Amino acid sequence: MKLLDSFSSGLQPYEVWLWQCAVHWRQPEAALLPDGVDWPALARVGLWNRAQTLLLGFLQARQVLAELPAADLASLQEGAAKFRQDAAVMGESLQIYLQKAKEREIDTAVLKGLSVSANVYGDTAVRPGGDIDVLVRQRDVAGSIEILDEMEIGQNWPNLMDDRYYERHHLHQQRCTPDLRLWYEVHWALDHPLTRLTVDYEALMDRTTPGTLLGAPVADLALPDLLLCLTIHLVKHAIYLPRVLDHPDLARIILADGMLMYFVDVAEVVKQFEGEIDWPQTVELAKTWGAAEMLGAVLQVCAGYLAAPVPGWVLAVLPAPGPNRVKQRVMHKVVAYETAVYLGNSPSKLWKFLLITNGAFILRPIRLLDLLEYCFPGRDYLQRKYGSGSIWRGVYHFLRAMGQYGRITLDTFYFTWERYWRLRRQNYSTSLFNRLEVDA
């Protein structure tokens, strides 16, 4: 396992402790740990990676809690307590929502967060998430929003654009309580339309099975779909994957980006359901969805750094990233910025601006590279999308993509202008860089 070589790979002891916690949190006595750990740094980076619950349990089992300075121990305990409080508040609300959805015959799958926390970790306080993500069929989005309205969870955050903008160009609608504490995202997709993903969401929902979550009825995702949903969400945020998969500092990059627990989610699904995962179906779906590169990259990290028992043949058949020097160079710039901030060095001001705006808009600057790939996608995508990889189908798709891009550009200007005047009338900040999404 690559992690066992990390003592000589340039990682600091506190970074090794975090990775060892991620691997061995169920059996802390099996962890191989170096001396000389920087306890404040361990606490800080653990919190940044949302690992406070696992880390506290791990440190307690290793009988080293007394080594932490009081302030750092308190910060971990406060972070874990907040997770418990969030899980309780979100769990109570989700139970009501799911019961109402069942009464209206709205099939609802719960993505990430409470679902993974309860079903994979066995503790809702491990990974409650920052919001509640539900996936419904597109025809049921309006009904889902009506349920939230009944629960007094509505359009209470003024910074959002008009629903029509998200309906046309996005993957979910957002709703929240008046105090902005509890958020829902009603998904009908896993990413915005201008990508090369070709997910059959109706078939995905058809493959769900009746289950329960927190005692309420829910549609459980099939394991292949669960793995792919977690993977796509991870790579949507860790935009540098899979282009930096062979980077020698990948373990540190993941910590710097605060993504450790996202990888642990996938690794734990593989570990907990090792004998139940239909790997041939998972690989086939990944190829059909256009997510094979993503899945291959994530599973390589999970197998190599987190000891996930991924079959070797699965890693062998999933494709490596194709040659794209521009994209590879950009993604290395992204991770250089993230690592510089993490290490306390002075990052590039240009890349700081690009990455700030990358979180503020649907068509994020870094992801414009994806748009170029979408306009000129290659035969594989054309075959998946249209059933034909002919040059004429490629021309048709290019013209269609230009139309889509033109519409989102016009809508972005229109709805940004509409938002500006609405916020101005209400005496709110009109900054374009107000958060348009809550943390996942």
Image (cartoon, helix red, strand yellow):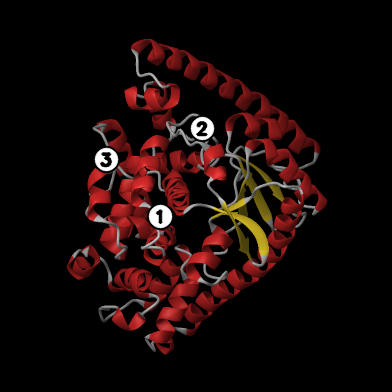
Q: Which residue is mark 2?
A: 363
Q: Earlier in the sequence, mark 2 or mark 3?
A: 3
Q: Nearer the viewer, residue 423 or 84?
A: 84
Q: For the point 73% across and 57% down, which residue is it?
A: 99
Q: Quadrant of residue 46?
A: bottom left
Q: Which residue is mark 3?
A: 319
The amino acid type of the residue labelled 3 equals: Pro
Label 3 crowding class (10 Å Cα cut-off): few <14, some 14-19, many 20+?
A: some
Q: Compared to 78, does 92 lie above or below?
A: above
Marks 1 and 3: CB-CB under 8 Å? no
Is residue 171 among the parts visible in the rendering? Answer: yes
Q: Earlier in the sequence, mark 1 or mark 2?
A: 1
Element carrying mark 2: loop
Q: Where does residue 278 sit, x and y in percent of width and height?
A: 38, 52
Q: Nearer the viewer, residue 79 or 243?
A: 243
Q: Where does residue 42 sit, x and y in percent of width and height?
A: 39, 73
Element carrying mark 3: loop
Is residue 251 among the parts visible in the rendering? Answer: no
Q: Earlier in the sequence, mark 1 or mark 3?
A: 1
Q: For the point 34% across and 76% down, which residue is it?
A: 38
